Image (spheres, coloured by chain):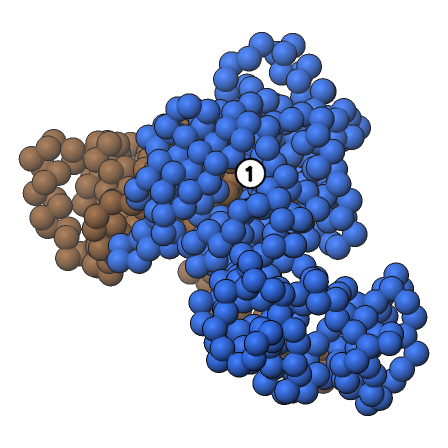
Amino acid sequence: MASVTVDNVRKSYVNFEVLHGIDIEIQDGEFVILVGPSGCGKSTLLRMIAGLEDISSGTVAIGSKVVNNVAPKERDIAMVFQSYALYPHLTVEANMGFSLRLAKAPKSEISRRVKEAAQILGLETLLDRYPRNLSGGQRQRVAMGRAIVRQPQVFLFDEPLSNLDAKLRVQMRSEIKQLHQRLKTTIVYVTHDQIEAMTMADRIVVMRDGYVEQIGSPLELYDRPSNLFVAGFIGSPGMNFIPGTVLDALQPAFRSESGLVLPLPTGIPVTPGQALIVGIRPEHIGVRQGDIEAIVELIEPTGAETQITFRLGGTPVIASVRERFDKHPGEKVLLQMDLSAVHVFDAKTGARLEA
Amino acid sequence: MKTNFFTRLLLWTGLGLLLVWSLGPIYWTLASSVTPTEDFSTRPIHFYPQHFTFDHYARVLGISISRIGGVEVWKQFRAALFNSVVTSVAATVLCVAISALGAYAFTRLRFPGRQMLFGLVVATLAIPAYAVLIPLYQIMIKMHLVDTYVGVALIYVSAYLPLSLWLLRSVFEALPVSLEEAAQLDGAGRLFIFFNIVLPLAGPGLAAAGILTFLGAWGQYLVPLIFSPQVTKPLTVLIPEFVTKNFIDYGLITASGSIAIIIPALVVIFLNRYLVSGLLAGSVK
């Protein structure tokens, strides 16, 4: 096991920079997930840690050793690819033992470690099958088995669940988390799915356009997003954003474009007339005994909760409530907002404003 | 898809023409090879043998003795068959081996001028053989390679390499690079990956390249006519020599021609097993 330190790492192709100075400290044994929309550079960063991409500037260290010029095979890492990348002409057993065979480990040792990993992943009965005879979930497990067998310092996962169907993805998610709790090996995991990130990670790194937007635990990111992008990216359904300006009044207040007036939390550094965006999560909007008038647009029951889209002046707003909702589209309702849970962002910079 | 009678008729006619076109000459060769020599001059021509004989095969295979120019036909035939096999097999093995290595380099290694170099090699496909025949002959004379196995095989390699290189590059390009990256992380070196991951998966491509090269080399006439006049003379050059000043030995020509068909047919049947697709199934996705 080892820590991974990414220090001011940049990546550029000819005249085009895709990573602009990334700094991430990953603790020994930590499960860190890099998340962001496609094209944000998360996979490139992972491949740089793996040694499959050159580092244009900055350093990547595994443990205390800078590995910029160390070949992938000498970095003591194992990677699980999005496409699984199983060797199609080798059996499951040979796939899993491939790296040990290359390292000239004794046969008994290879077979012992392959059996061990197979047992962890429930692959014992599939060892002499070929990848083509396995289901998607089984292939995914073999790909993980191949990584486990090596007992590396660091596991790298590159969107490992994106080829699986929804149900299997949920199942594998908990399996990977359990695996981490059991092996306690450092994991760097890339995904574009924020739910995967929220459910599995010790810490999440949110990336966009080659920059790190925020690093923190899942709930830190959820409760205190440092900017509009993170606020909108984390959480499903996403945070509601209401654009408006600061009212020129003694008590700081917010007036939305549609005329809704909300008090602002005290102590926030705002100036009258400043353009703001107020964010509120769907679960902080209630549908009983409120004082904010809105029109029902769409009702989406999921069973456990109901997601309702309202029109609040000109802005669509989504509420997520646990109680049953008996209104119909077009009807008026009075909403109530939990003002202690409101997030305030500067409309120009997108940065979070706090006392 | 529903097809009406007229469409079906058209398709079957096309298929029929194609069959006659490609199988007709082969039938004619086989039929002639079992026709007695006297029957070749009878008129009208019959489309199937009126009498049946294995006499021509007996002469070709040395069961009965027959001489042309004082040398037994059987011995000439045996030597030419051997030469054809040796030069074609050598050319095929060399060509596939070299083009596999080259195509892999063109696919995965980044070096300056990569695209242009590849373009140049493939562009040589457009150069007709007769354009380079005379300079090539001078080179071969100087290197003492005329009428040697090495010389002829090398010419075949240079002739079929570009096609094979082209074909294998597209085969390698279609292989998922993540497999090679996985192997790299597992601790494998470039050559290990090439021989243990890439080549087994490129089986169908290698078989196709092998078939193309072998058939091409086997059927060559112009090149061996010039570069293999005596010792390394192959079947394609020997068989027309059964036409002498006074007598065209149709029986001998067609019997040896029929035997000459067997070898490439066997090669194709053997390599065809590797042409199956779906080798990658289960590897990615």
Quadrant for residue A239, please give it: bottom right
What secondary structure is marked by label 1?
Answer: strand
A212 left or right, relative to A195: left
Residue density around tag 1, few if under 14, some if 14–19, many if 20 or more, within 10 Å: many
Q: For this rendering, which residue is in front, B112 or B195?
A: B112
Residue A264 in view here: yes
- In the picture provided, is B172 more to the left or to the right than B54? left
Name the subunit of mark 1: A
Note the chain letter of the blue one.
Answer: A
Residue B46 sits above or below residue A80 on the image? below
Q: Which x, y percent locates residue B8?
A: 67, 79
Frontmost residue, A44 versus B85: A44
- On the image, the x and y values in percent for residue B39 come to 48, 56
Chain letter, brown in picture? B
Residue A174, position as x, y percentages in the image = 75, 41
The three-letter code of the residue at mark 1 reads: Val
Residue named by callout 1: A188
Query: Viewed as shown, does residue A110 lie left or right of B180?
Result: right
Identify which residue, B26 or A81, lies in the foreground.
A81
Please state, as top left, top right, bottom left or bottom right, where the N terminus of chain B lies in the image.
bottom right
